[in-house]
Amino acid sequence: MPIRTEHLNYIYNPGTAYEKQALSDIDLELPDGQFVGIIGHTGSGKSTLIQHLNGLVRATSGTVWYNGEDIYREGYSMKELRSKVGLVFQYPEYQLFEVDVFTDVCFGPKNLGLSKEETEARASEALRQVGLGEEYYKKSPFELSGGQKRRAAIAGILAMQPEVLILDEPTAGLDPHGRDEILDQIQKLHRERGITVVLVSHSMEDIARYVERIIVMEKGRVRFDDTPKKVFEHYRELEQIGLAAPQVTYVMQTLRGAGMDIDLAATTVEEAKASILNYFQKKAQEG
Amino acid sequence: MIREITIGQYYPADSVIHRLDPRTKLAGTLVFILSLFLFRSYAAYLVATVFLACVIRASKVPFRFMVRGMKAIVVLLMITVLFNMFLTPGEPLVKLWKLTITREGLELAIFMAIRLSYLIIGSSVMTLTTTPNQLTDGLEKGLRPLNKIHVPVHDVAMIMSIALRFIPILLEETDKIMKAQMARGADFESGGVVQKAKSMVPLLVPLFISAFRRANDLAMAMEARGYHGGEGRTKMRPLQYQKRDRIAYLTLVVYLLAMFAAKRIAGF
């Protein structure tokens, strides 16, 4: 279901010395089935923004519409909204609390008031989706490795079967292997179930590989909102706000500067490779 | 939602009170509180009110921050006032069914209300104008003579400063975990007492684990930087009394004399 924000403003600690405008005038639309990346420097407001999308933080002014309904309307069920818009926090493994992995994943669906059978069916399904087999069900969350813990925690959200899945820095603190595993599983989920996925990150590399749209945040405002190729064209501006385009962008820029006629819009290593090989082939034919 | 707790919260501003030596402020607060309990007279409380108002004015901290600390003790205040009002024997003023309000009771209730609220506001002035670090520095230096009788002053001060430092961290952590569990459909508000207590488990377990993890990390980081207790440890910014501190102490003496005089001369 689509989410839309309208003139969203949020001020931390209004009326005190610590007052800070965290979001200013955010107008966004997230249509169904999109894989969106939100990127921004620390303190750019990206985490604050996503907490508005499932009603955890109430905007100072402005509205959030979920499926055409104003979520601040009186009597609107926030609990239902939170089951539809699943939010995986940063370091989600810190929220694990049950004696074993399976019971912990059951916490979400149980809160939705589902029957025991349904709850357990959803929990098994969610754990399958994140690649944790039955041998992990009865383990204490503290026996797992960092990457496994994180996957168990993500399963805790997936078990609620959300229509929109928002992940705040899901790869922070993981090794490259664990990072690829998690991102690949999220991508698979997006393809299999067709849910909307919002990926918050500050790594352009991670984002460029998976998403179809990038939202760049700066100081509580949306600076760019476009396809990765279009956004990376502004790599100079991205640098100015403390971000960087993927490394291939720089490689391609340098090669172009050296007189090679290649595609500057390549955002992944594969695309760059194809473009460079293409150039050499053409050159060989000419020569 | 939890950010509203003000005890131990510093309000940054550039004022004389902020710049005072923490020892001066500690002593001042102590003297002020003692004076509230020593002088039982309306005239003396008038002096205390003027003094407190001047200090608050000089601190440049908005008054509503002081009052915010009062919210925590409203219940305690009500109970004290009611008990004193109804249960003090003496000359009856009003009779309500079986309860009697006596003149002595009413007087006692008013005094207690003033004392308690001034006590809270007075200590709020100190915590709002002093960073927790300054406060423990002040305590450590102020209590140093106790070292002679083998009180581990440095260790106590260090424990206090770490505890204070952890309050905002743990508050933030609580906020984060609460939100994370709410995103999983947890409900911390509705239900009876038992239900509410049960709903705290998903919050408290991760909070304790995180507190232990942080404590462990901190201990390790301190040892890695060669911390070995207070012996031979020097300060980067040693506390030193300035001219303004001497003026402050002088003001304090004048205040005490005024309290004394007010009680003597006015006689009520």
Image: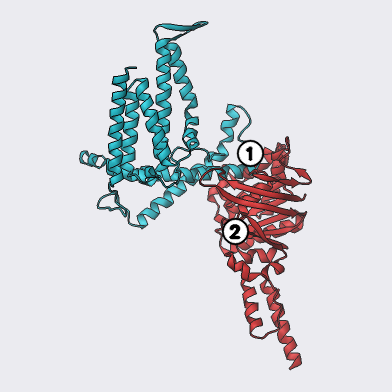
Chain colours: A red, B cyan
Q: Nearer the viewer, residue B76 or B25?
A: B25
What numbered label is drawn on residue A245?
A: none
Q: Residue at x 65, y 78 (%)?
A: A252
Q: Determine which quarter of the picture holds residue A243.
A: bottom right
Placement of B181 over or under B198, stated as above or below: below
Query: What amino acid is labelled 2 in the image?
Result: Thr
Q: Residue furthest left?
A: B148
Q: CA distance from mark 1 to mark 2?
A: 25 Å
Query: Where residue A20 sits in the image (x, y, percent)?
Result: 56, 49
Q: Which one is nearer the viewer's eye here, B18 or B120?
A: B18
Q: State whether residue B83 is above or below residue B197.
A: above
Residue A225, percent from left and from top: 70, 61
Residue A171 is labelled as: 2
**Contact, mark 1 vs mark 2 (Cβ under 8 Å):** no
Considering every residue shown, the one lying at the far bottom of the view is: A287
SS at mark 1 in the image:
loop
Nearer to us in this view, A113 or B8: B8
